Amino acid sequence: MEVSTIKEYEKTGILSLKDLTLPTDKQLKKGVAIIECVQEIPCDPCVAICPVNAISMKDINALPEVDYNKCTGCKRCVGICPGLATFVVKVEDKKALITLPYEFLPIPKVGDNVTALDREGKTKGTAKVIKVNKSGKTTVVTIEVDKDLAMEVRNIKLD
Amino acid sequence: MGSILRIKKHPIIDFKDKKKILFYYNNKKMQGLEGDSIASALHVNGIKTLSHSLRFYRPRGFFCGIGKCSSCFMTVDDIPNVRTCILPLEENIRVLEQDRVGELPDKKFINRKRKKIDVDIVIVGSGPAGLMAAIAAAEQGVPSILLVDENHLIGGQLVKQTHKFFGSKGEKAGTRGIDIAVELMEQINSYKNIDFMLETTVVGCYNGKKNHKLIAVKRLRKGDQLFEINSKNVIFACGAMENMLVFPGNDLPGVYGAGGVQTLMNVYGVKPGKHVLMVGAGNVGLIVAYQLLQAGVNVDRVVEIMPKIGGYHVHAAKLRRCGVPIYTSHSIKEVYGNGKVEGAIVVKVDDNFQPITGTEQDVPCDTICIAVGLTPSIRLLEQIGAQTEFIPEAGGHVAVHDSSMQTNIHGVYVAGDSSGIEEASTAMIEGELAGISAAASLGYNKNARKLKQRCRKALVEFRSGPFGEKPRICNEKIASCWNGGINY
């Protein structure tokens, strides 16, 4: 067994930022989709739903590539992704807006204060719910957190 | 009355208010809901022990939840050995725990007068593969197609898949399995040339020169009916059964197949317990663990004996960000409890999968889910004489078949998990391929070549990534068996 070739996220289920191709600060200001999909699995609905063709794949097993210049941060890919692996992040002066898929009850309401969680489910303070949309049974929630948590917070918890 | 286990609100499934049903368990009056199976109704009432082992009289609960194992056998209305996990609950039904093997009553419960049915294609199993096979054959114009399934619902395991499927737009990607089941059922209903028989178990298959003969029993409330189905072609899409893992205490009520638990909560709306330990981090383990959280059940952790997570990272990430830890290079050592699961000892393993002394951890829990793979259901294929081979990458013995899904028996086809363990998307394509091939062999071959090529291309595409390695190897091995090649 070639244990040495196993990537850290394959052991833990948690990605580090090094595993991702990240947008520039300028692109983040505009708000772009970050697809945390790092394995070649046969799946491409994100490519089909993107209205500006910002997401591309060489074939159905390839990794999705986001053209951060083309991406408008429209959030459609957040609700369609079967792996719930797509997020839209927009960084403002002091705050960041994170849009994430949510499939639990109760459904958060605009204005709610919820607990922000990172990729390991650890609490990262409080987030304010800015927007709530439905994409089928998946709720697409936009929350506001401190700017420095933009690339850390990926889930919420309601009490 | 145990109703804490009933799921009232769910983010994905709409569990509507249902009619209450009274029934008797060991002469005690109990209440369930319309749509319950006997086992799910008993579970809600706190009855986890359904039977006892033959030799040592150890308590046994259900395991697979889909009628494939025998651990839920009970006596229902005087009939012994009834699979209570798939029998719908009925008003005033009398359920008894039987003394080991049960007693055959004097009562006549099978109508010996067999009814004969003649069809062009019979399909055994109405999961994704069977449904697509029926639709494809119907589309080709085959006059009479019969779908037979032993469950009371159409859709096989699609009916419990609340997550969105992967794949491409053409293959229903982004749609939840439960919704695909509804879509396919509507399609099936729109074809006049497809009939289906539910709650019907095929118990015998005979390979004839012109026709194949299947003997089936349809469960009816007053005396089951025996059927003799004569069919030119047969497609077996019988699915698979969950594997068991060997450890002390693995037969305690509360140790369930992960798929069995998925059925219990997503089909019947019943939680398996309050606190779960998941064994296995393949896609089934990861998905069911997440769905347990959605049903409001606590998942303590997932343990996986391999050094890496076997399922898709995206499924693992969903669990991790909800705070559920995944322990790779860990396994279950034993389960303890008095008559039911009260906890488990998990242990770290070394590179040779041997437990490392001193790394044991005690995990208190009331439910253990076993998600350690599946074995293809091929008993009927063996009975009809299809050649089988042991292919580890396929999950066990599978029927050897050609690129049109036909076995070495003329007119007998196989599709879905019973042709090698994979997932629902490829099962649907294989079903389509088998349906088109079976239709073509009867002369309904419009565009058959083109359609088959499209299916084969889709299968190759699906399997071309790193997660398609096992099905690819499996396919190569089957092809070489078919060509009379190597023996393993």
Image: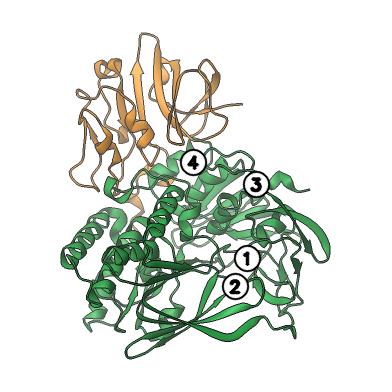
Under mark 2, the amino acid is: Arg
What letter labels the chain drawn in orange?
Answer: A
Element at badge 1?
Answer: loop
Identity of the residue drawn at 36% across and 70% down:
B419
The crowd level at tag 1 (other Cα within 10 Å; few <14, some 14-19, many 20+) is: many
Identity of the residue drawn at 17% across and 43% down:
A58
Q: Please state the chain letter of the residue tagged with numbered disc 1 in the rendered image.
A: B
Q: Which residue is mark 2?
A: B219
Rendered location of residue B202, percent (x, y):
50, 77
State which tag comes first along the sequence, 4 or 2. 2
CA distance for labels 3 and 2: 36 Å
Is B415 left or right of B324, judged from the image as shown? left
Of the two numbered discs 4 and 2 in the rendering, the one whose residue sits closer to the viewer: 2
Q: Check contact, mark 4 vs mark 1: CB within 8 A.
A: no
Q: Quadrant of the N terminus of chain A?
A: bottom left
Q: Please state the chain letter of the residue tagged with numbered disc 4 in the rendered image.
A: B
Rendered location of residue B94, percent (x, y):
76, 67
What letter labels the chain drawn in green?
Answer: B
Q: Choose between B390 and B197: the one closer to the eye.
A: B197
State which tag comes first along the sequence, 4 or 1. 1
Identity of the residue drawn at 29% across and 58% down:
B468
Of the two numbered discs 1 and 3 in the rendering, the one whose residue sits closer to the viewer: 1
State which tag comes first along the sequence, 3 or 2. 2
Can you tell which mark lies on residue B275?
A: 3
Element at badge 2?
Answer: loop
Under mark 3, the amino acid is: His
Q: Which residue is mark 1?
A: B87
Q: Check contact, mark 2 vs mark 1: CB within 8 A.
A: yes
Under mark 1, the amino acid is: Leu
Q: Check contact, mark 1 vs mark 3: CB within 8 A.
A: no
